[in-house]
Amino acid sequence: MSRQIVFHGEYFIDFYKKLDLGVKSKFKYVFELIEQIDMVPKKFLAPLTGYEGLFEIRIEYQSNIYRVFCCFDKGKLIVLFNGFQKKTQKTPKKEIEKAMKLKDEYFQQKD
């Protein structure tokens, strides 16, 4: 099975451009895993509890934690939204709200 990763808007790209090379290569590795593996370990991709259809891609690099919100479209397509570096245990509510807004926007534009 293979999945395809696509971007909704420039949100993720803008975030990604600011990252250093090591972090970018870790992102690349995790994206390849997601594209190629049926059952992606929760360590790398997990649903966000309480937010219908929203998932987070999890990246850890040199004790820094990064998250990218995404959703599935027809099971084979993963749509990336916003990304950020996590500074605390809790995921910032404003980042989740932004991702939900982008998810709604994506499906509205698609129809």
Image: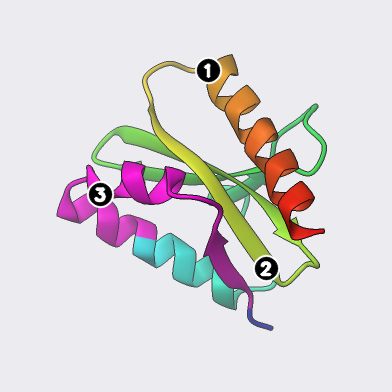
- In the rendered image, which quarter is residue 98 located in? top right
In this picture, is 58 found above or below 39? above
* Label 1 SS: loop
Q: 33 and 92: which one is in front?
A: 92
Q: Report the number of discs.
A: 3
Q: Position of residue 4 (x, y in %)?
A: 59, 73
Residue ID at (55%, 64%)? 6
Residue highlighted by disc 3? 17
- Which residue is label 2 attached to? 77
Upstream in sequence: badge 3 or badge 1: 3
Q: Residues within 10 Å of mark 2 (few under 14, many from 20)?
A: some
Residue 101 appears anywhere in the view: yes
Q: Secondary structure at mark 2?
A: strand
Residue 91 can be seen, yes or no: no
Amino acid on which disc 3 is placed: Lys
Q: In the rendered structure, does residue 94 fall within the stretch colored magenta? A: no
The answer for how far apart the CA atoms under marks 3 and 2 are is: 23 Å
Give the residues drawn in magenta, as a range. 3-27
Residue 61 position by quadrant: top left
Picture residue at 77% right of the left edge, 31% below the top: 51
Report if residue 5 lies within the magenta region.
Answer: yes
* Whole-number angstrom distance, CA of label 3 to CA of label 1: 21 Å
Does 45 sit left or right of 30 as displayed?
right
Q: Nearer the viewer, residue 14 or 91?
A: 14
Local packing at callout 1 (Cα closer than 10 Å; few below 14, some 14-19, many 20+) is few
Q: Position of residue 24 (x, y in %)?
A: 27, 55
Q: As drawn, is 13 to the left or to the right of 7?
A: left
